[in-house]
Image (cartoon, coloured by chain):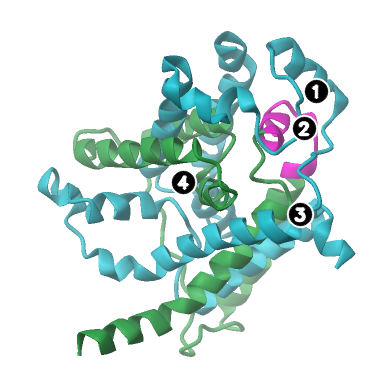
Amino acid sequence: MEFILQPWAWYIAGPMIAIVLLLMNYFGHGFGVSTNLETFCTIGGAGKSSDYFKKDWKAQMWSLFFVVGIIVGGYLSSQYLMQSETIVLNPKTVTELSELGFENAGQSYLPAEIFSTENIFSLKGLSILIGAGFMIGFGSRYAGGCTSGHAITGLSSLQLPSLLAVIGFFIGGLIMTWFLIPLLY
Amino acid sequence: MVFNSFTILTMKNIRFLFIGTLFGIILSKSEVVSWYRIYEMFKFQSFHMFGIIGSAVVISMVFMQLFKKGTIKNVKGENIIQKEKKKGLIRTLVGGTIFGLGWALAGACPGPMFVLIGHGITSIFIVLFGATLGAFVYGVLSKKLPN
């Protein structure tokens, strides 16, 4: 039990994610999360705006169950499986973040500077939350997958489009982290 | 009748709920859902995320080979085939870059977004709303965008 309550090391988590991929494939479906965003659009009636969304969303039911499971997993972890939310960060990261105005880096999973509920009610805070989400949704569907579909499934099955997409993920991530976040904060 | 087909649909899919629960627990417990872990990764100040994605890819590669050889078959006894990803230099690089910008800013990709709903983070609903909107705009423009 002590082991479960501690944060899990990379060499535990990585192989377990591969087992999730194995289970998904064994039960007849690929490993991927971002397609669900399109399914939400279809359920919301987006078929009226574009033929792209005229699909039978019930065929994606398995994937919706997967997503509900992810939420349940998050709930169970936060309620029962965590002793603390403290994250042991590189001290350099903590110093750099405090220079940007991020206080208490690593004291919890998320920085209050971005995710506090008050941010929803400020123009800047709301724009950042919606904008970040928009780029995630638009980018992953344009690229044809996200971290699970491209970086893990695509790279491990040696698909060239996935390698290009992952290179893109890093170009975007590096630009945001090194240049844009210091401008925004 | 309606109830019956609903029950069958649920029974068949409940296994994916359990796999999702496992996935959600892994992402929580390994701190992948933490904004700080993603920031640290893009700053190259920690091996943690590289280790997780790297080892997941390497072990998945072994599984992929076993799928290909037919050593591991699916629950129905059929060969497991991976869907081919859509090709296109612009689509993958530009789409990937836009995704990367969002990933680094929100510190979460689609999987962790759902985990954070489970953690009770109200503001993540706004990110999820933005992501659904982004997928919608992509769908509407999909025929006009270069591949």
Chain given the colour green = B
Inspect the magenta stretch and tell me whether residue B19 lies in it. Answer: no
Marks 1 and 4, how far apart at CA: 35 Å
Pick the front one: B121 or B77: B121
Q: Position of residue B144 (x, y in %)?
A: 19, 34
Task: Residue type at mark 4: give it.
Answer: Pro
Checking the image for residue A94, the label placed there is: 1
Say which amino acid is labelled 3: Met
Give the residue at x 49% y 90%: B77
- Checking the image for residue A161, the label placed there is 4
Q: Residues within 10 Å of mark 4 (few under 14, many from 20)?
A: many
Across and down, in percent, residue B98 comes to 44, 30
Chain letter for mark 2, please: A
The chain that hosts pointer 3 is A
Q: Residue A56 at x, y = what percent?
A: 21, 65
Find residue A181 and report its horizontal and vertical position in percent: 59, 17
Helix, strand or loop at label 2? It is: loop
Quadrant of the frame with the N terminus of chain B: bottom left
Q: Are marks 3 and 4 in contact (CB under 8 Å)?
A: no
Disc tally is: 4
